[in-house]
Amino acid sequence: MNSLLNYLTGKRTAPLNMLVALLFAVFAFVALPLPANETTPGTGLPETTESEQVNKIRDNFDVSEGSAAFIVYFSDTEFTDSQLEWLQGTFDPQIMMPSGGANEKFLEFTNAEVMGEPFVPPATISEDGKTALITVPLDATDNFEITTERVDTMRELAPEAMPAGLSVYVTGPEAFIKDVGSIFEGADFLLLAFTAGVVAILLLITYRSPVLWLIPLAVVGTADGMAGILARRGADLLGFNPDASVTGILSVLVFGAATNYALLLIARYREELLNFEDRREAMRIAIRGAGPAILASGSTVAVALALLLLAEIEGRQVLGLVSAIGIVIAMITGLLVLPSALVVFGRWIFWPFVPKVGGKNPYEKSIWAKLGKTVAKKPLAVAAVGVAILATLASGGLGIKNGLSATEIFIEKPEAVLGQEVLADAFPAGSAAPTYVIVSKEYADEAAQLVDIPGVASIAEGDGDSQYAELRLVVDAEPESAEALQIIRDLRTELEALPSDAVALVGGQDATSLDLADATARDQALLVPLILISVFLILILLLRSLAAPIFLMIAVVGSFFSAVGASWLLFQNVFGFPALDLTVLILAFLFLVALGVDYSIFLVTRAQEEAKEIGTREGMKKALGATGGVITSAGILLAAVFTVLGVLPLIALAQVGTIVGIGVLLDTLLVRTVIVPAIAFTTGKKFWWPRKDFAD
């Protein structure tokens, strides 16, 4: 240990360590980057789910399988004769179908043919005569560039020569893929720019130095870049392909965690500079003091994130893998690179508030030291008030709703959503997203009778092969809504009446959403206990205590429920979000428990260090005075960084950012600085039970 500390802080070895780190960073940036991902991400569901089994069977049908785009023309009043003629064309007896209609604009895209010629079905007119739908059959592709190009081209062609009084939208599966994907074009740069800007401003405010903030920002920024590259490499080795939402969260997570570690180390370094003339010795003592907290904190977050590899949905597995890699890099940077970067320069980097040997420790008279003394006078009452505040906020989550429909996932609705809403008003809501029932051929007629249930607007024969028949159902409910998912459940229940040797599967967009919801429920049931157990065990190993980890775990879970309750009130009354996205609760729980416990670790490890000399109660007072400022700065910074996720117009990311931001602030300003100290003041040396080497 001493050899490593001497290497990190030595007069000659510290610059050498910086050079080694720089060379490794250059190698990573030059030799390891992977090409940008141009593949449209799939659902991420395992092959055993019913909707994925349907997709696999349908892929084997001897038909031209593909995707579709929907061109929706709309008028506020019933179409005029001239508008209808432009939309539908005129009947040509030679080819026995209309010709010259708006559908002919899209012949170059279709994968359908009639008599060897490209064919796009003529426009279908709604019953009220205000909406026309042209369905353009397309070849399926997972190349996002191809999807973007043809959707953009159709959107250029659709309004050409359009009569006055009409509006047009291009929607459907292809348009949704394009519009969702376009959200993330340039997202990495946007998130990085906002995140780096927020971190720079808060570091400048925290240190009030024109120089010091540049050092952690440069180190953290480099760590973030390396994390993105190495995490994608790790994902690629395991066959994963992270999309822009995953890499965006990774960037926010690494910036937030690495900056937290930097704040803790620099605060301890500055404190030790008051005791040692030799800045290198001061740094060695600072690493010994802050190092265990950083190591335990990073390990806690990395282990919790790695548990996402046990999730059923691939997207969560990818997020867990790349985020765990990112946190490890952030931790290594904070422990092995930042110390050398700081000691290479003199004390002057703290200018104009340069710490001098023998100077007064500013933490002794800080607001947090005064708060500790105040809480110590009536700790039980203070703890009760703190718990009451958490409980009141948590009550705001009563009646919380989960699950957004396909048209509700955006903060700002793109064209695909607007078109889908027009379609839903004019035709059965599920017209644009049919449900497929795959059944053994000999039971097709019986299945058709069973699936004729309330909520199913129409049933038609679809494709098939020698083994399976297909029924195409239109569900009269908005795609991916709670009503649509319940209809899918009812369909699957009805099909259970078929003989046991019959294959009867329900697939399609709504079925996929139902399977995602069920997989999410299973992931939560598995991962939530595992995350709590892993964090609890790490706290036990760190503190060699049982009582303190139990108190800390109860506090962190309480702050999670309070954050969810407070956020739900905001989502309902300020932002107008109809529900939480399915992924929000599990991600928010993971980030809040793993990151929130960081502040407990920062506080309690310092309290334990001081308690060895001056007892538990006095040790907690001194620890609160010494770490209260850095915990507050770190918490505000992390909350601000997660709020940056709201710059992207997806409700899920905005919700995760808001819940984590509020939760971190509660952890910082209430739980770690008031409730936890109050518990320690109340319990005294029992706080460390079963250890007996501490006094009250």
Image (cartoon, grey):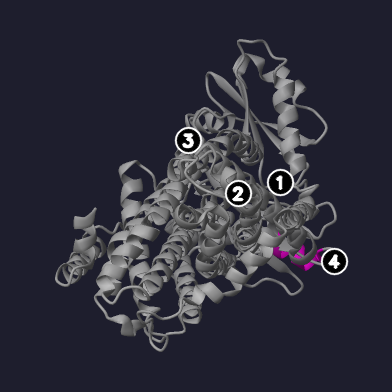
If you read the primary sequence from the N terminus, does the residue marked by circle 2 or circle 4 appear first?
A: 4
Q: Is 675 positioned to the left or the right of 116 in the image?
A: right
Q: Determine whether 93 is above or below 63 in the image.
A: below
**Residue tagged by mark 4?**
77
- The crowd level at tag 2 (other Cα within 10 Å; few <14, some 14-19, many 20+) is some
Residue to which mark 3 is pinned: 310
In the visual, does 115 lie left or right of 189? right
Relative placement, left or right, of 233 versus 694 is left
Q: Which amino acid does label 2 sit on?
A: Gly
Q: Which of marks 2 and 3 is in front?
A: 2
Q: What's the CA distance linking mark 3 and mark 4?
A: 54 Å
Q: List the residue tagged with mark 1.
A: 402
Majority secondary structure in the magenta region: helix
Range shown magenta:
79-87
Assess disc 3: are there few (<14), some (14-19) or many (≥20) residues with their C-alpha within 10 Å of its C-alpha: some
**Distance of mark 2 from mark 1, alpha carbons?**
42 Å
Residue 633, position as x, y percentages in the image: 53, 70
Disc marking residue 684? 2
